[in-house]
Amino acid sequence: MDAKEVLLRLATVDLVIPAWQMALYIGIVSVMMLRKRYRVCVVWTYLFIMYWGFYLYGKEFVAAAGDSVLGLSVYSILGMLFVLLTLIVFFQSES
């Protein structure tokens, strides 16, 4: 596949993230970067990616899990655990 085919494929992708969510994300990250709060930007980016991943592919997650709530529980718990551990590391390295 050459570069032209790759660009044509990328041009046909529809992004279904609502504009207000994208604006909210850009606004939060921009304000935090202007305030030089780069670590907060990392956490916000991760949280938005987790949310958008579930927003876009939530039906597939639920369909793959069937009647079990284990998959969704693992997704949520591991996501929040990652944020918690990231915040702990950020606060320990500041002191």
Image: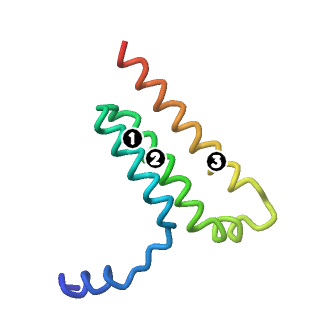
**Label 1 sits on residue:** 42
Foreground label between 2 and 3: 2
Between 49 and 32, the one nearer to me in the picture: 32
Residue drawn 45% across the image and 43% down it: 44
Please, what secondary structure does the residue beneath circle 3 have?
Answer: helix
- Determine whether the residue tagged by mark 1 lies in a helix, strand or loop: helix
The label number, if any, that marks residue 12 in the structure image:
none
The residue that label 2 is drawn on is 46
The vertical placement of 89 against 65, above or below, is above
Residue at 37%, 12% (x, y): give it: 95
Q: Quote the CA–CA distance across marks 2 and 3.
A: 13 Å
Q: How far apart are marks 1 and 3 (CA)?
A: 18 Å
The residue type indicated by label 2 comes to Tyr
Cα separation, mark 1 vs mark 2, equals 6 Å
Mark 3 = which residue?
76
Image location (x, y in percent) of residue 33: 30, 39
Q: Are marks 1 and 3 in contact (CB under 8 Å)?
A: no
Q: Residue farthest to the top?
A: 95
Q: Going 47% across and 66% down the picture, which residue do you hit?
A: 19
Q: Earlier in the sequence, mark 1 or mark 3?
A: 1
User: In the figure, residue 54 lies in which quadrant?
Assistant: bottom right
Question: Amino acid under label 3?
Answer: Ser
Indicate the position of residue 7 as horizontal and vertical percent values.
Answer: 24, 82
Q: Residues within 10 Å of mark 2 (few under 14, many from 20)?
A: some
Foreground pick, 80 / 55: 55
- Give the residue type that dot 1 points to: Val
Residues tagged 1 and 2 counted as in contact (Cβ below 8 A): yes
Q: Which of marks 1 and 3 is in front?
A: 1
Q: Is residue 81 left or right of residue 72?
A: left
| Secondary structure of the residue carrying numbered label 2 | helix
In the rendered image, which quarter contains the N terminus?
bottom left
